[in-house]
Amino acid sequence: MRIAKLGAIAAIAGTLLLVSRAPENTNAGAAATSNGRQLAPGEDSLSDATAAVVPEDDPAAALHLANEWSTRFPEVLTYVDADAVHFRFPSEEHVAVTLPENRMVVAAAPYIERTHPCVTHTMTTCRSELRNEPVEVTVLDAGRDVVVSKNTKTLDNGFVEIWVPRDERFTLRIDGRNLSGEAELKTSRNSSTCLTEELRLS
């Protein structure tokens, strides 16, 4: 009888030992980033950013998506030139959403103290000083007629995006914080899509 009891106790102890040594990997099913880091709860997975999601027939929507992904998925390089909105994926896949024949978009960053030189606006990396700031944007053509006039806010990256007709020269004026700045805006096929140093507010 004593031997039977000892055998039962040993069996229970063995079971407890096995349970205590069970793996403690609570993230076994969690997704990981491209560098292997485990994602925090609610964090986006890079698998959500695929070429299939890019709206190839809607350049305005593509631009909006590129801005959104610049912080959610910085592994995807997004930028806009005079021809298209571009998405370059870690897999080296490239999607270009063609801009309209008669219009292009220019990103302008007003600043007071700090900015950076730029030619091609890269949503993934371009950051400016005045973020989420109310500004007044005015675009005048060569005859000083108003082409664009709007009150808006700079984006999270400090830029405002302006759609303008192609193959012309304009004057861009931005007012904010009771200051103003002006710059020449060109829209030829080889024009810059990023205006920074020219737009110091004073």
Image: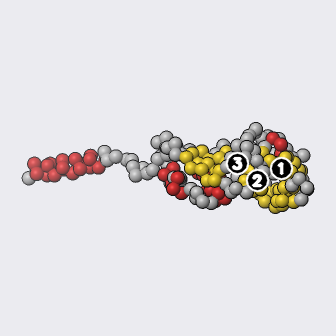
**Distance from the alpha carbon under mark 2 to that under mark 1:** 9 Å
The picture quadrant where one finds residue 135 is bottom right
Q: Say how many tags the image has.
A: 3
Residue beneath the point at 52% across and 46% down: 93
**Distance from the alpha carbon under mark 2 to that under mark 3:** 9 Å
Q: Residue furthest left?
A: 1
| Position of residue 123 in the picture relative to residue 170 (left or right) | left
First in residue order: circle 3 vs circle 1: 3
Does residue 22 appear in this view? yes
| Position of residue 191 in the picture relative to residue 94 (left or right) | right
Does residue 74 appear in this view? no
At mark 1, the secondary structure is strand
Residue type at mark 2 is: Arg
Q: Are marks 2 and 3 in contact (CB under 8 Å)?
A: no
Provide residue 53's location: percent of width, then percent of height.
Answer: 54, 57
As drawn, the label of residue 82 is 3
**Distance from the alpha carbon under mark 3 to that under mark 1:** 14 Å
Q: Which residue corresponds to mark 1? A: 169
The answer to whether 41 is drawn above or below residue 89 in the figure is below
Q: Residues within 10 Å of mark 3 (few under 14, many from 20)?
A: many
Provide residue 17's location: percent of width, then percent of height.
Answer: 27, 46
Residue type at mark 3 is: Ala
Q: Which residue corresponds to mark 2? A: 166
At mark 2, the secondary structure is loop
Provide residue 63's location: percent of width, then percent of height.
Answer: 65, 55
